[in-house]
């Protein structure tokens, strides 16, 4: 990479409130918004962070003045946070009703951690429609309505559960899963999962641990749920499993032979997302 471009950053969202939810919205959740605000230096403007915008726009200054920043875009550099900051700053600068359709390869400069007010919580709202693309007072022509409905048809049913931070139930075809983004260092999470798996305790009531995703330097363990499970069905089992998982995360001793074998098996179950 050229010297005048940002260096690669393994955990681009580290230091932001709700880092695991940033990763989840970037990679796993089809339609959602979340709250953010720029610093006073950048106008103390409210920002609606989103999963995706039409035709993969990086950002949109909506006609009603709301600024939207999309996470599910293809980055230009090795630092996703820098790429997103470029799109956000451009969106703040353009006239309402204007989309930021592309961004070039950025030079080193402010990242989201520099542009956003880090005291504002990243509160996620999972949605079942991309209607948020439009300002509320926008006239819904038949073409606009058809475009929204076509986009909505591809949404995977997803629910953010309350029993654990950054945990999402989803239904894919006839199967249901729980995907739980972790805030901890990757090696800590893998060691914890290995300890539980070696003790045959990596699953919980009605759920079997099946593998994990890796994205933006974090780990997202995945459990397959009992067929037909709804989001509300996993709240109590996850709440009961959480202390056991947290205890395993807190263990710091070396893995024993069984746990090392379990950990080696886990590596074969990983999927790296970009």
Image (cartoon, rainbow, N blue to C red):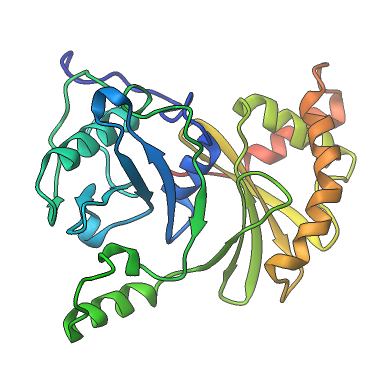
Question: Is residue 15 at all visible to an observer of this figure?
Answer: yes
Residue at horizontal 64%, vertical 71%?
175
Image: 165 above or below 183: below
Name the residue rendered at 84%, 31% in the picture: 247
The quarter of the rendered structure image containing the C terminus is top left
**Dividing the picture into quarters, in which one does residue 218 lie?**
top right
Nearer the observer, 216 or 132 = 132
Residue depicted at 70% across the width and 61% down the height: 224
Near-viewer residue (231 or 139): 139
Q: Is residue 218 left or right of residue 93?
A: right
Residue nearer the viewer, 60 or 10: 60
Is 175 left, or right, of 256 in this rendering?
Answer: left
The x, y position of residue 265, in whole percent, is 71, 40
Q: Above or below — where is 179 with respect to 169?
A: above
Q: Is residue 79 visible?
A: no
Q: Position of residue 155 (x, y in %)?
A: 43, 70
* Vertical order, 61 against 19 (above or below): below
- The image shows residue 67 at horizontal and vertical percentages of 26, 48
Image point (26%, 33%), residue name: 83
Residue 183 at what x, y percent from top left? 60, 32
């Amino acid at each position: 990479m050229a010297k005048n471009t940002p260096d690669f950053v393994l955990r681009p969202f580290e230091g932001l409130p709700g880092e695991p939810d940033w990763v989840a919205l970037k990679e796993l959740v089809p339609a959602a918004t979340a709250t953010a605000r720029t610093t006073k230096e950048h106008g103390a403007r409210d920002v609606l962070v989103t999963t995706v915008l039409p035709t993969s726009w990086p950002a949109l200054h909506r006609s009603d003045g709301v600024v939207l920043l999309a996470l599910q875009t293809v980055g230009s550099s090795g630092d996703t946070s820098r790429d997103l900051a470029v799109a956000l700053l451009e969106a703040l600068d353009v006239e309402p009703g204007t989309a930021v359709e592309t961004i070039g390869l950025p030079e080193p400069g402010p990242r989201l951690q520099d542009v956003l007010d880090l005291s504002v919580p990243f509160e996620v709202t999972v949605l079942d429609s991309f209607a948020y693309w439009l300002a509320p007072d926008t006239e819904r022509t038949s073409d606009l309505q058809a475009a929204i409905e076509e986009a909505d048809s591809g949404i995977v049913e997803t629910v953010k559960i309350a029993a654990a931070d950054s945990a999402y139930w989803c239904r894919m075809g006839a199967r249901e899963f729980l995907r739980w983004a972790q805030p901890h260092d990757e090696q800590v999470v893998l060691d914890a999962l290995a300890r539980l798996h070696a003790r045959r305790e990596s699953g919980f009531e009605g759920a079997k641990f099946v593998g994990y995703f890796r994205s933006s330097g974090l780990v997202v363990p995945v459990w397959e749920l009992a067929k037909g499970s709804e989001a509300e069905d996993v709240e109590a089992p996850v709440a009961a499993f959480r202390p056991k998982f947290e205890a395993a995360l807190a263990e710091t001793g070396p893995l024993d032979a069984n746990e090392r074998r379990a950990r080696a098996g886990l590596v074969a179950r990983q999927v790296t997302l970009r």
